[in-house]
Image (tube, coloured by chain):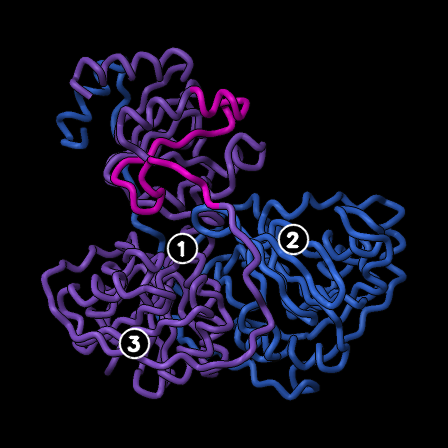
Amino acid sequence: MKVLVPVKRVLDYNLKVRVKPDGSGVDLSNLKMSMNPFCEIAVEEAVRMKEGGGGHAKDAATEVVAVSIGPDQAQETLRNALAIGADRGILVKADGEVEPLAVAKLLKAVIEAEKPDLVILGKQAIDDDNNATGQMLAALLGWPQATFASKIVLGAGKATVTREVDGGLQTIDVELPAIITTDLRLNEPRYASLPNIMKAKKKPIDVKTPADLEVDTTPRLKVLKTAEPPKRQGGVKVKTAAELVGKLKEAGVI
Amino acid sequence: MAVLVIAEHDNASLKDATNKVVTAAKAMSGDVDVLVAGSNAGAAAAEAAKIEGVRKVLHADAAALAKQMAEPLEALITPLMSNYDAVLFPASTTGKNAAPRVAAKLDTMQVTGVIGVEGPDTFVRPIYAGNALITVKDEQPKKVLTVQPTAFKAAATGGSAAVETVATPGGAYKSAFVSEEMAKSDRPELTGAKRVVSGGRALGSSEEFNKVLEPLADKLGAAVGASRAAVDAGYAPNDYQVGQTGKVVAPELYVAVGISGAIQHLAGMKDSKVIVAINKDEEAPIFQVADYGLVADYKTAVPELMDELSKAGL
């Protein structure tokens, strides 16, 4: 089984973003960029399908292909996926904002050429917080989707996926090929070892452009302005539980 | 313009999130219809008809819609969009799952997690875990939005819209419901609760989490939440998670116990009316957003708070 894993380069999740004073966007200059955490979980799961970890049979996946859409530097993100254990990478080189709909169209074109049996993606990117690419890709391909996965069990021609939903867990079957998006508890991604980081440097990365794939990536939504959220003012410190209850009564919330 | 709101419901009853999304829809247009898609969901459809300002309710009833999975929902909603200019989903796991599938079929880029409607085509949404807000103009002929219900007031009830039955497209789907494990609790649901008691990593274990928070939640009639750190550590189930990657809540009272206040947690609760923080670390960022901060070890502070609440008649 061939597994394709799209990965996104985003601002490192430990860093706080700053809005540019003129409201024209966020300032990412000189800040560390990393692989989106949900994408790391997706790569880890695909690699476990190959290695035989996480409840998967060894060689359940025969090849893991990582794909990234972004600037030249997204090659670093692909190298990171290769260091975790993906076999090869594809970079679709695109500068500037590419919205999830365009990403889904680019991925569809890659998938039509690569013909994977399973595509695993992060449920959302922590920069634009859209939570949309996987579902859009499933729609464009006419494939079933299992979003917010916390457990994947591969079967004959299907995957049984447990999903994190409001109020609990839901388990569904999806026929393969299918789209699965990862939630936090699916697995804990490994740290790539130094030998694997070295090995990853020799793995192939193929570079394409949106023009090669005949996809128009012009954004559909026009961002009029970017602003800081209204600041919430910290209030007062209370000394005792009795004082706290007094304040809550005054505020009318108890 | 005509706007379709996708109802949040569990077949038996309508969720308050629907009324909130209707409020967002009314800020776009006067022509707002609600779709109740489910199985034996007549009661939910009747409730939706009572929301003030709703023009009519569309009711689709089929076994395939019982769990409101993405494939049948998309197959139902996409053709209905020939009569509408915009469709609004609540930003619940059901809405987040189905909305992009509909959007892609309509060749629309969706606007995700809308917290403000400035006009029929201008919306405010958070990015970077709520650390920045963008205002976007959406001039696409068919608009698809997911709406953060906590950002809008619930539309009142008292209306009497007509309920119209719509046919559900037949068809074979490539996904099938197997089972579900829903948390059984007498407490209110986290996203709609008026009071929330939330715990962090400082609680140290799942036993301690339950032992400390459950009695306090019961006393306050509150839902229980958790920080991502507490969920990651296994102290609380994932559906308790409040934050960027979990649930967004905006109760009247939010009590954070042993939560440091990471950015990603604040993104999920900073719109609460009154925030109380109990933390022994005076420097914890949670105090920067808390209305009332108590610098104390939760081990002594929570029992004292329980006593004081009892004295106050709770």
Region of the chain picked out in magenta, as a range: B182-211
In this orientation, does residue A215 appear?
A: yes
Label 1 resides on the chain identified as: B
The residue that label 2 is drawn on is A34
**Which color was chain B given?**
purple
Instruction: Name the residue: 66% across, 69% down.
Output: A175
In what element is the residue under mark 1? Answer: strand
Give the tally of numbered discs: 3
In what element is the residue under mark 2? Answer: strand
Residue A84 screen position, x and y as percent: 79, 52
Label 3 resides on the chain identified as: B
The residue that label 1 is drawn on is B132
Instruction: Name the residue: 17% across, 71% down.
Output: B54
Dot 3, crowdedness within 10 Å: few (<14), some or many (≥20)? some
Return the residue nearer the eye: B144 or B284: B144
Task: Give, as a three-letter code, the residue at label 1.
Answer: Ala
The residue that label 3 is drawn on is B121
Task: Give, as a three-letter code, the residue at label 2.
Answer: Ser
Structural distance between the alpha carbons of marks 3 and 1: 20 Å
Residue B263 screen position, x and y as percent: 45, 42
